Amino acid sequence: MTCRAARPEDAPALLPLVRAMNADQGDRTELVDAAALLAAPGTMTMLAERDGALVGYATAHPTFETGHAERGFYVGDLFVDPAHRRQGVARGLLAALAAAGLAQGAKHFWLTAKEDNFAAHALYRRLGGHGEPVLAFACVEGHFQALADEAAT
């Protein structure tokens, strides 16, 4: 298994994995645009390949943690094809993101997982991560637009 940075030409092969992750998380799959993901400014996307096929991917984007006064990144997606789980793929993807982030000046990364995703929790702890009780909120679609419109008034 090898991990590498994604390239624009990887979009068609990446699309089924992104759709599978969304389906796994109960999110919509029809909106996925892998080419747009790969073109998003500042986004790092790493791919895991085995025998010439993509078996996993991870995305991250930069952030700044004021509590530690340092740059870092937030891991948005981490997905491994079920047939390739528990074989070091997720750890390899996170290591590749960590190396790329470090090269850009990052000193840490943040990960999230749903409350019942115990396999992810265990992996993140094995990496040295510690869990924090956080409730995540998303302001999307019309609510996001309405909030942005408030700035114009």
Image (spheres, rainbow, N blue to C red):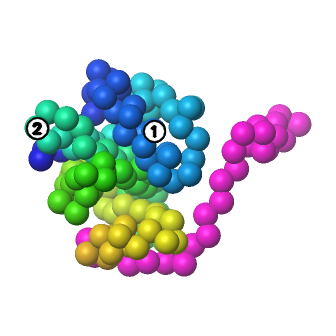
- Give the crowd class for mark 2: few <14, some 14-19, many >=20 residues within 10 Å: few
Query: In the picture provided, is 60 more to the left or to the right than 83?
Result: right
Check the image and report above or below for 128 versus 39: below
Residue at 27% from the left image edge and 33% from the top image edge: 6
Q: Amino acid at mark 1?
A: Arg
Residue at 35% from the left image edge and 26% from the top image edge: 11
x, y percent for residue 71: 39, 57
Residue at 43% from the left image edge and 47% from the top image edge: 21
The magenta span reads 127-153
What residue would you read off at disc 2? 51
Seen as rendered, the residue at the extreme right is: 153
x, y percent for residue 38: 39, 30
What residue would you read off at disc 1? 19
Quarter of the image where one finds residue 3: top left
From mark 1 to mark 2, how far is it between C-alphas?
A: 21 Å
The secondary structure type at the circle numbered 1 is: helix
Q: Is residue 137 magenta?
A: yes
Q: How many marks?
A: 2
Residue at 38% from the left image edge and 78% from the top image edge: 130
Mark drawn on residue 92: none
Query: In the picture provided, is 150 more to the left or to the right than 112?
Result: right
x, y percent for residue 29: 53, 37
The secondary structure type at the circle numbered 2 is: loop
**Which quadrant does the C terminus fall into?**
top right
- Give the crowd class for mark 1: few <14, some 14-19, many >=20 residues within 10 Å: some
Is residue 1 visible in this depiction of the protein? yes
Q: Is residue 92 magenta?
A: no
Check the image and report above or below for 80 versus 39: below
First reached walking from the N terminus: tag 1 or tag 2: 1
